Amino acid sequence: MTTQPSPFIYRCSRCGREYPGDTLRYTCPVDGGNLDIILDYQRLRRELAPTRFPGEDAEPSLWRYRALLPVAPPPTQGTPLQRVGWTPIYALPRLRAVLGLPHLWFKDESPNPTASFKDRASAIVLAHARQIGADVVITASTGNAGAALAGLAAASGQRAVILAPERAPQAKIAQLLIYGARVILIQGTYDDAFDLSVQAAQQLGWYCRNTGYNPFTAEGKKTAAFEIWEQRVRAEPDATWHIFIPVGDGNIISGVYKGFWDLHQLGWLPVLPRLHGVQAEGSAAIAHAFFAGRDEITPVEARTLADSIAVNLPRDGWRALRAVRQTGGQYWVVSDEAILAAMRELGQHGVFVEPAAAAAYAGLRAALAAGALSPDDRILVLLTGSGLKDVAAAMRAVPSAPRIPPDLNALQRVLTHDMTS
Ligand SMILES: *Cc1c(COP(=O)(O)O)cnc(C)c1O
Ligand SMILES: [Zn+2]
């Protein structure tokens, strides 16, 4: 089945100005606002039916939603591109019982080909680059966006250039290099890499994937909302849903909002789930603006072990505020200690996530402690990346293992100590 990409226009999220969708645009030329991609909802409403969408034989990946995507799907057969998205949802029954939340769910993004949520965005951006004949795609990244671009570009035979801060976790840098991308480590912050990549793209005529700059990343990320709807929400249209999402630049939460908003425009989802943004205490520029009731976001000097959400100036902050305000959600701020505790706790239920993902669960813990959730609520925590992405952080979350000589007595001494302590 070949589907034409869904026709669209761009609309500025700040001033509402609209621009034709005939060329690649990044941000609004008037006020620098992030651009939303607006589909032809009237036509889609006529052509699609919610109960039969996307259909029983739809493929088990984000490409099942091609009718609602502004890009033509690339050939995926026989490559890792065929398994981006359609990630599992877990109940973790023992954890539900501990928390007293019988309708709690976890969506695990680590089965994506490069082990993070970012594959959703990179898949769609690469499809768009291919469609418009762009040769080289560049991105700045704290690690995961770059790994996703590098891995999927390798899968599709496209060329990727990645600018990452030199202090990115080793596993993420290893991924970039193994996938054969052109990798340049920047002696500076993610924000420095961001500015440099935009300049390079302009100078060299390259296609720029940057999060919170390229409008197509949110179109990839919205597919998580489609999945949450298809996997859970559609069956319980009257329930109150709360979704916990870790926030750095704010593009994941904006993308998830966009997915639910698309479904609402189609008339398939009467009430949008409440979106809860979770930021690390030391990197909470968006949460600060939310608490102060302001629209303007003041940059911070980011300090957190959760590198994927360590951002000085969030590039999608305005839409990240809108997503939470429009859905009646909240922002939550969590400490690095709470993030490590969350990693440990999830691990004990068989789920190994990186610090940024654990932050979403720490946010749920904070909301629960604040009395903001009830046992009737439907709750989903978005676990955005695998724990293998940042082994050093994982080692900080747990006590080290005892070391003994290969000797039964020594083993017995350790085990006795375990049982008595
Ligand atoms: C990028 C990332 C986030 C944060 O997404 P933003 O769009 O920057 O808010 C959270 N978790 C993981 C694992 C990520 O890679
Ligand atoms: Zn504008």
Image (cartoon, grey):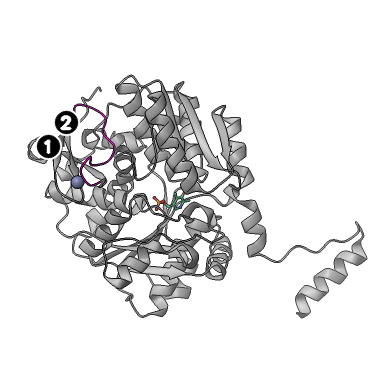
Mark 1 residue crowding within 10 angstroms, few (<14) / some (14–19) / many (20+): some
Residue 161 seen in the figure: yes
Query: What is the three-letter code of the residue carrying label 1?
Result: Asp
Residue at 20% in and 25% down: 4
Q: Is mark 1 within 8 Å of ligand 2?
A: no
- Would you identify the image quadrant in which residue 135 lies? top left
Q: Position of residue 355 (x, y in %)?
A: 53, 58
Q: How many marks?
A: 2
Picture residue at 39% right of the left edge, 52% below the top: 249
Q: Residue 339: where, in percent of width, then height?
A: 53, 65
Question: Relative to 129, does residue 297 appear above or below in the rendering?
Answer: below
- Above or below: residue 207 compared with residue 320: above
Give the labeled residue for mark 2.
7
Read off the magenta span: 21-31
Q: Is residue 156 magenta?
A: no
Q: Which residue is mark 1?
A: 40
Q: Quadrant of residue 75?
A: top left
> Where's residue 310, x and y in %?
49, 56
Query: Please, what is the three-letter code of the amino acid marked with disc 2?
Result: Pro
Q: Which secondary structure, mark 2?
A: loop
Secondary structure beneath label 1: loop
User: Which residue is rendered at x = 41% and y = 34% of the image?
Assistant: 199
On screen, residue 301 versus residue 399, left or right, reads: left
Give the crowd class for mark 2: few <14, some 14-19, many >=20 residues within 10 Å: some
Q: Is residue 156 above or below residue 105?
A: above
Is any atom of residue 353 visible in this view? no
Are discs 1 and 2 less than 8 Å apart at CB? yes
Q: Residue 250 in the image: state x and y as whole percent.
A: 36, 53
Query: Which residue is found at the position 35% from the left and 33% from the top?
Result: 125
- The disc, 1 or 2, on the residue closer to the chain's N-terminal end is 2
